[in-house]
Amino acid sequence: MSSPAIPYVSDMGTQHAITALRDKRGELAGQIDALQDQLRQAFIDMDHIDATLRMFVPDIELDEIKPKPLPPRHRAFKGQVTRAILAMLRKEGPMDARAITLRLMAERELNVNDSGLQKAMHKRIGAALRNLRERTLITSSQGGCGLLIWTIATGRTAT
């Protein structure tokens, strides 16, 4: 006799889907538990800091201390993107910013199909390209479809 919680399913493909969904639900439940533990610890840590602050400034208004935003996801170490762009341009030759973005995302094993992440990475790479151009390490020229084509500056050994 079948359980009312998990009805009998005769199709084997459906059974595999149910098993995969159960596994995923268990995984998400584990993540939620871990995040709740982290949140609980963060509250404890903040209470300790609040108590220490009150030792130094008894009448402090803790609500006036604004939360600081977290750093953006997929943050690169200082100079990492610049070095990757220079290495890519040396190896591949002239490229547009979109190609550089997609190549760099693939190298860092980021999801190239995530349009939000792709847009954020494109902005960061665009800023790095402009900075490199200002430092005369690379140059840009007008390419097809209105895109700028980036290349290592002639006579420079970009490091």
Image (cartoon, rainbow, N blue to C red):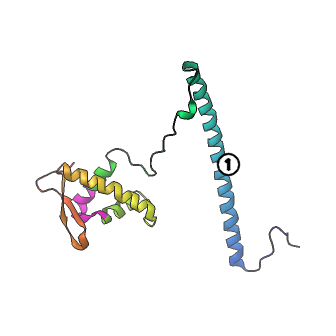
The stretch drawn in magenta includes residue 89? yes
Foreground pick, 34 / 128: 128
- At horizontal 48% and vertical 45% (from top left) the residue drawn is 70
Height in image: 106 above or below 57? below
The image quadrant of residue 98 is bottom left
The 10 Å Cα crowd at callout 1, few under 14, some 14 to 19, many 20 or more, is few
Span shown in magenta: 86-97
Residue carrying label 1: 33
- Residue 82 is at least partly visible in this image: yes
Relative image position of residue 83 (x, y in whole percent): 28, 50
Dominant secondary structure, magenta: helix
- At horizontal 59% and vertical 33% (from top left) the residue drawn is 46
- Side of 10 where 110 appears, left or right: left
Foreground pick, 48 / 155: 48
The stretch drawn in magenta includes residue 114? no
Height in image: 30 above or below 50? below
Q: Secondary structure at mark 1?
A: helix
Kind of residue at disc 1: Asp
